Image (cartoon, helix red, strand yellow):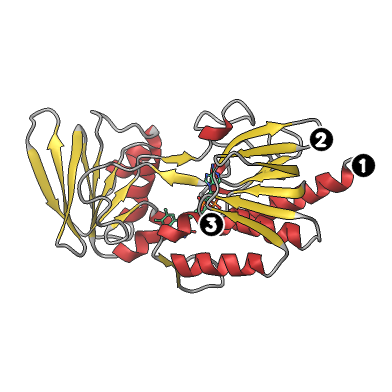
């Protein structure tokens, strides 16, 4: 068995692998797609100490750093089940294989919920964005739209309003669902237009980048078009925990509940990164959490009975 078996090869999993391997213990990483969400990212400008890089380049750097250590990387493998035994924890893979660990670190990340309208996929990273902390500054002085009137959408709109020329917030329901204090703040901003009962129908572009958004007024059925340069989709971040239901404790949003050491509800099972209840989903935060989880797993191993 592995001393530390890591499921997920994004920034959190890579950091966990490096920290575990540096303890000289048997470490394995199994990942569906080594690199994780950063593979879908263009510019990264907020990973502290790296002024500017690109997602695929960052993913290659992660992999090279992990490969500098004695770590088994099992890429393009999907975990389907976690089984916590008395001594060992098992991870069943889609290919039928079973991996065993004395400790396991879960770092399967998350994915942004998409609006699924024409233009969204085509213009992803070319005007369609999902992370205001990451991509907000790219739209400085421009016009943007935020899709979604829940807490994340309204927070994004407030955040962006301080950077961009104008924000149009589109909410499908008749009312914004965010906390009242956020809605009040949003309504006080001069450069924000709020449209409720609006169903986004298309993100338009010139073939290279976004140039507008179309939505249907749900009450009248009329379709409207707004010219702009950017669209932030803020309708939810979905943790990749479907395969863990009924095992580790999950929050009501499906995130793995962890304590400050990255410990889950199952002894010997730790978790890190976007898949957990950690506030703020960012690379630098996932990397720190991966290190925490690996150090906690090591701590668990040295306190467990010797066999
Ligand atoms: P992930 O990166 O999601 O990695 C999860 C890993 O688990 C992957 O290897 C995946 O294949 C694997 N996995 C999932 N399910 C399974 C399974 N069942 N079995 C096996 N493996 C599995 N953050 C920033 O800080 N700056 C930015 O500029 C930035 N820009 C972004 C732009 C975009 C378009 C996106 C989508 C995200 C961006 N983020 C940015 C957020 C950042 O990418 C995430 O916070 C970070 O990648 C989280 O790392 P993670 O390791 O927790 O999860």
Under tag 3, what secondary structure?
Answer: loop
Query: What residue lies at 44% left-to-right and 45% top-to-bottom?
Result: 111
> Percent position (x, y) of residue 227?
14, 55
Q: Residue 87 carries which label?
A: 2
Please indicate, yes or no, whether residue 260 appears anywhere in the rendered image.
no
Mark 3 nearby-residue class (10 Å; few <14, some 14–19, many ≥20): many
> Residue 107: x percent and y percent?
59, 47
C-alpha span from label 1 to label 2: 10 Å
Instruction: Give the Cα separation between the discs numbered 1 and 3.
Output: 33 Å
Q: Which residue does the image show at 70% across and 43% down from the upper left?
A: 104
Q: Earlier in the sequence, mark 1 or mark 2?
A: 2
Residue that extends furthest to the right in the rendered view of this protein: 306
Q: Earlier in the sequence, mark 1 or mark 3?
A: 3
Q: Is mark 3 within 8 Å of ligand 1?
A: yes
Quarter of the rendering containing residue 139: bottom left
Residue under label 3, please give it.
34
* C-beta proximity under 8 Å, tags 1 and 2: yes
Residue 206 position, x and y percent, is 14, 62
Left or right of 91, for residue 108: left
Q: Is mark 2 on a helix, strand or loop?
A: loop
In this view, the residue in front, 168 or 181, is 168
**Number of callouts in the render?**
3
Say which element carries label 1: loop
Say few, some or many: other residues with alpha carbon within 10 Å of mark 1 (under 14 / 14 to 19 / 20 or more).
few
Residue of label 1: 307
The outermost residue toward the top is: 246
């Amino acid at each position: 068995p592995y001393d530390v078996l890591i499921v997920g090869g994004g920034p959190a999993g890579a950091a966990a692998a490096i920290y575990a391997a540096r303890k000289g213990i048997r470490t394995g990483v199994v990942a569906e797609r080594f690199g994780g969400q950063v593979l879908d990212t263009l510019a990264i400008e907020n990973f502290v100490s790296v002024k500017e890089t690109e997602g695929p380049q960052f993913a290659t750097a992660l992999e090279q750093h992990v490969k500098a250590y004695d770590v088994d990387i099992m890429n393009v493998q999907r975990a389907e089940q976690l089984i916590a035994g008395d001594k060992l924890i098992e991870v069943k893979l889609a290919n039928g294989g079973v991996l065993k660990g004395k400790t396991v670190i879960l770092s399967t990340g998350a994915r942004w919920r998409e609006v699924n309208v024409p233009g969204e996929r085509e213009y992803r990273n070319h005007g369609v964005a999902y992370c205001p902390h990451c991509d907000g500054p790219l739209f400085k002085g421009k016009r943007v739209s935020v899709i979604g009137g829940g807490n994340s959408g309204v927070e994004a709109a407030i955040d962006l309003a301080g950077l961009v020329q104008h924000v149009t917030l589109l909410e499908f329901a008749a009312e914004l669902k965010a906390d009242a204090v956020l809605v009040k703040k949003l309504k006080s901003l001069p450069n924000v237009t709020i449209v409720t009962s609006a169903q986004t129908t298309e993100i338009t572009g010139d073939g290279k980048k976004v140039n507008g958004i179309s939505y249907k007024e749900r009450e009248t059925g009329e379709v409207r078009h707004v010219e702009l340069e950017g669209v932030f989709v803020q309708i939810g971040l979905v943790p990749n925990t479907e395969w863990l239901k009924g095992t580790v404790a999950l929050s009501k949003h499906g995130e793995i509940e962890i304590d400050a050491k990255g410990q889950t509800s199952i002894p010997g099972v730790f978790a890190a990164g976007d898949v957990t209840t950690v506030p703020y989903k960012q690379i630098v935060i996932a990397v720190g959490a991966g290190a925490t989880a690996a150090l906690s797993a090591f701590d668990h191993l040295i306190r467990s009975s010797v066999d």
